Amino acid sequence: MSKQRRPLIAGNWKMNGLVGSATPELQELVKRAGDHPDPKCDILICPPATLLYEMVSLAEGSAVKIGGQNCHANESGAHTGDISAEMLKDAGAEYCIVGHSERRADHGESNAVVKAKAEAALRAGLIAIVCVGETLVEREGDKTLDVISDQVRNSLPGGATASNTVIAYEPVWAIGTGKTPTPENVADVHAHIRKELGSMMGDSDSVRVLYGGSVKGSNAAELMAVENVDGALVGGASLKAVDFWPIVSTCI
Ligand code: PEP
């Protein structure tokens, strides 16, 4: 991990959690974070939208920040079932994940759609976490770096800076599978992302680039030690504080 970039360990709860089950987990996380008055990394949980308000109020005054998992590009309007970035902000969110591979796959979100959502996040004053990553077919076809270039160039919001945008490199084949790329593979892709960012933004050296895909307590230290890895986006292992904490511990 770099000294110049403050790491971010982010949990994505996806479509998991009810008030009854999520409350003790967040309380436990807040309690553990409270034992570190001067944390050296940012800690984030992105619960389902139904839990945002409750989780924001439980995390208030702690180092644990709360974010959304998705937003609509528009501020308001006739979009039944959707949630705007302004609504996330209003509920107390500070970040919003956009372009997660599950949304790109399940909802056909193109780079243009992801970019519009990332711009909505910035408009609302949220930090956008823009996800990029290749499928297994793309990796096996030696297309990884081309896919990443295309996604980085076309999904990032206009006006992206190191303070309003985070990139998460998440190989699709590593999400929820227990498989991870080698540290060398991760280093190659992160170096490539940083090179792309260099041609797009002034303060690219300060942009945080997270790794995501089957991060757990047992592999977090190795992955977080890779050059240009500035934290993690964690799915399954973020659902229980007892599993998430060892990942946070690699940088706190
Ligand atoms: C994710 O969904 O962003 C993710 C990385 O999931 P998991 O950690 O379960 O692989």
Image (cartoon, rainbow, N blue to C red):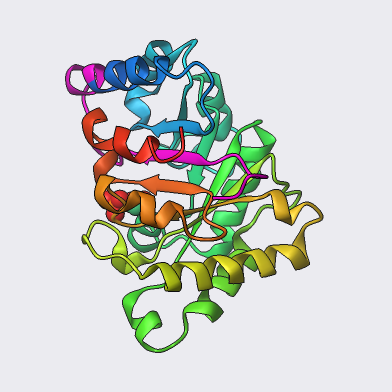
Reply above or below: 3 against 102.
above
Name the spot of residue 112 as percent of width and height, x first. 59, 62
Q: Quadrant of residue 178?
A: bottom left
Q: Position of residue 9 (x, y in %)?
A: 44, 39
Q: Is residue 11 magenta?
A: yes
Q: Residue furthest right?
A: 202
Labels in figure, total: 0
Residue 120 in the image: x percent, y percent?
62, 41
Q: Is residue 14 left or right of residue 120?
A: left
> Which one is in front, 122 or 173?
173
Left or right: 102 in relation to 126: left
- In front: 119, or 137? 137
Spot the residue most to the bottom. 141
Q: Quadrant location of residue 106?
A: bottom left
Can you say whether 165 is above or below 58 in the image? below
Tell me where residue 236 appears, x and y as whole percent. Answer: 24, 45
Asked whether residue 100 is in view, the answer is: no
Mark yes or no: residue 3 visible: yes
Residue at the image point whose x is 76% and y is 49% from the top: 159
Residue at horizontal 60 percent and vertical 60 percent from the top: 155
> Residue at left 21%, top 61%?
177
Q: Nearer the viewer, residue 121 or 139?
A: 139
In the displayed structure, 189 sits above or below 78; it is: below
**Stretch in magenta:** 1-24
* x 45%, y 34%: residue: 68
Q: Is 99 in the magenta?
A: no
Q: Is residue 75 above or below residue 173?
A: above
Q: Nearer the viewer, residue 121 or 83?
A: 121
